[in-house]
Image (cartoon, grey):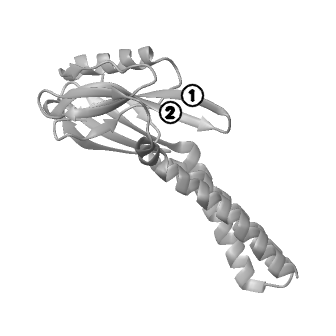
Amino acid sequence: MPITCQYRSKFAGFIFPIVFVAFLTSVIAAVWLAIGGGGDAALMLLSALTFMVFFAWMGFNLTTGFEFEVEHAQVLQVIMLGFWQRRTHFCRFDEVAAFTVKGIHNRARVQTWWEYQVAMLLKSGRLVGVAEATAKSVFESNRLAEKLAAVVGCEYFPGENQKTVQVAIAGAHPVFEYRDWNWSDVVSEFGLPTIASLIFFCAIVVFIVTLVVMLS
């Protein structure tokens, strides 16, 4: 049996803003229809509701992950959406240099906390998160990283508490450094979620302005 690790794709962070925008659009269309928008308003309402339902369904049914297939010594990338599944070759075991755990420093208002994510280093130098980041202790993520390294047959470097990882040397014999979180990590880790949040707030502003114009 292959070992499977699930993770949340970056695209998934855009699903809720899209659903929210579609919902606001349907409200605007409903108001337009109520004040005499006619067929155009009805078409807009139907389209917005269709988009909202579809992406909401996608948000609840989209699953992404990696499978480590021992029989064929390969890593597969898996995407599942409802009953539809797609498995594609990601890399061979002999292309993997090591496994480790990187820390992610989260902030929300006055709260801060750390999450830890198992990461796979390819000999090409690419570092790939292969499991969902967890707020549990770094030692639990280290156990999973060690298990995957044993399955693949590569090196394992345990992550450190409240530290992120930096690859000093990639290739057949990698070297990892563990350092404090900095602003470049914030940009690389939270850049896309920040864009999704901006879409969310911009949609609210546009919604309010549009309603004021329509009802004035």
Judge whether residue 33 can be spotted in this image: no
Please tell me in which quadrant of the rendered image residue 119 appears.
Answer: top left
Left or right: 125 in relation to 129: left
Task: Characterize the local packing of mark 1: few (<14), some (14-19) or many (20 or more) Cα atoms within 10 angstroms.
Answer: few
Left or right: 133 in relation to 72: right
Please tell me in which quadrant of the rendered image residue 36 appears.
Answer: bottom right
Q: Is 60 or 139 nearer to us in this picture?
A: 139
Q: Residue at x 33, y 26 (%)?
A: 178
Nearer-N-terminus badge (2/1): 2
Q: Is residue 212 above or below residue 202?
A: below
Judge whether residue 96 can be spotted in this image: yes
Q: Residue at x 49, y 17 (%)?
A: 137
Please tell me in which quadrant of the rendered image residue 72 appears.
Answer: top left
Q: Position of residue 113 (x, y in %)?
A: 57, 28
Question: Contact, CB < 8 Å: mark 2 with mark 1?
Answer: yes
Q: Residue at x 50, y 33 (%)?
A: 105
Q: Is 136 or 83 nearer to us in this picture?
A: 136
Q: Which residue bears the numbered disc 2?
A: 105
* Residue type beneath disc 1: Trp
Q: CA distance from mark 2 to mark 1?
A: 6 Å
